Amino acid sequence: MSLGTDWAALKLEIAYASGLWRLLEPMQGGAGIILKFERVRPARHAAFQPLKASEVTPQFLHRVIIKLKHWPFDIVSMDEACRRVQAPHGGRRFVVLSFDGGTRDFVDYAWPLLSGHQVPFTLYLPSAFPDGLGRMWWLALEQVIATQDRINTVIDDRRRYFETVSTADKYHAYHYLHGWLRSLPPQQLALAIDDLCARYGIDLAALSRKTAMTWDDVATFADDPLATVGSSTLNYPILANLDDAAAKREITQGQAVAEAALPVRPRHFAFPFGDRAAFGARDVAMVAEQGLTSAVTSVPGMVTAGADLHMLPRLAWDGRRSSLRVLRVMMSGAL
């Protein structure tokens, strides 16, 4: 972890030990929390893991579920969470277990745990991914940098070179290029990542198909009454980088494809990536106009009574951490 991440975790550990969070929780804890997880898979030991923050191990998820059953929270579905936001009843707060990305390891590792514990959960699905058409460019970027000692690409009409021999160099290159690629409109992003993949021998299409769950995978849990499958656009673009027509098309087509494939029409939505730079008021309005019950972001925070159901905050767990004490303090809303 970086020094900043270490210091943040230390502050939360100190907060737990002090007990101050217990005093602040009734005032700042809100009506509930939506926890955000992405990939659930066994720990890897490579030195270069730029996406480790968005991964948790099955063992950690197991520990979280056990603790949530003992902490003063009700584990609920998204439908029930929305009902409680609109009609607060007091008493125990709720927690929603939500999963993004539509990766196959959810079926391999998360679903057996969730099913075994008999807890409700929500999975947000970019609809092109189960069809084998999604492009997980962030994984391709990781592989390009992991396998090369030096890479180059054209940025703003200028060829840039990145030394990627050391682990530190690889992290620097990844974060710089990830930020640059995220800033591009979809067509320019596709050209840029395709160029990198062609130059350094990465098959983006095959990598994406291997990583994404199929509709057959989705069918293994979609009929479970504890499962809620929501949509997350068609191709998982940064909506803020799209014009009005393209943004609406991504939202509507993503919902339409999921509706055709699922036993129940998707009622809930997740903004791709979901941070403040990834979507705007226009996109919130479009989701509401589609008749979707709710939309979640990746903006951190507690869910308060009467909150806008189409712009709900979530708490994303940093997979580089393992302390449940830190999670408990975060869920109190104290910090």
Image: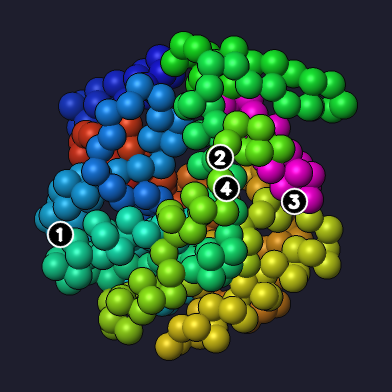
Q: CA distance from mark 4 to mark 1?
A: 40 Å
Query: Mark 3 belongs to which amino acid?
Result: Pro
> Residue under circle 1?
69
Give the residue at x 31% y 50%: 40
Position above or below: 283 against 177: below
Mark 2 surroundings within 10 Å by alpha-carbon count, few (fewer than 14), some (14 through 19), many (20 or more): some
Q: Quadrant of the N terminus?
A: top left
Position above or below: 112 against 279: below
Helix or strand or loop: what does disc 2 sit on?
A: loop
> Residue under circle 4?
204
Q: Nearer the viewer, residue 149 or 128?
A: 149
Percent coordinates x, y for residue 63 in the rendering? 15, 48
Disc 1 versus disc 2: nearer the observer: 2
Q: Is residue 193 magenta?
A: yes
Helix or strand or loop: what does disc 4 sit on?
A: helix
Query: Mark 4 belongs to which amino acid?
Result: Leu
Quarter of the view holding residue 243 = bottom right
Bounds of the magenta segment: 174-194
Helix or strand or loop: what does disc 3 sit on?
A: helix
Position above or below: 335 against 29: above
> Residue under circle 3?
186
Q: CA distance from mark 3 to mark 4?
A: 15 Å
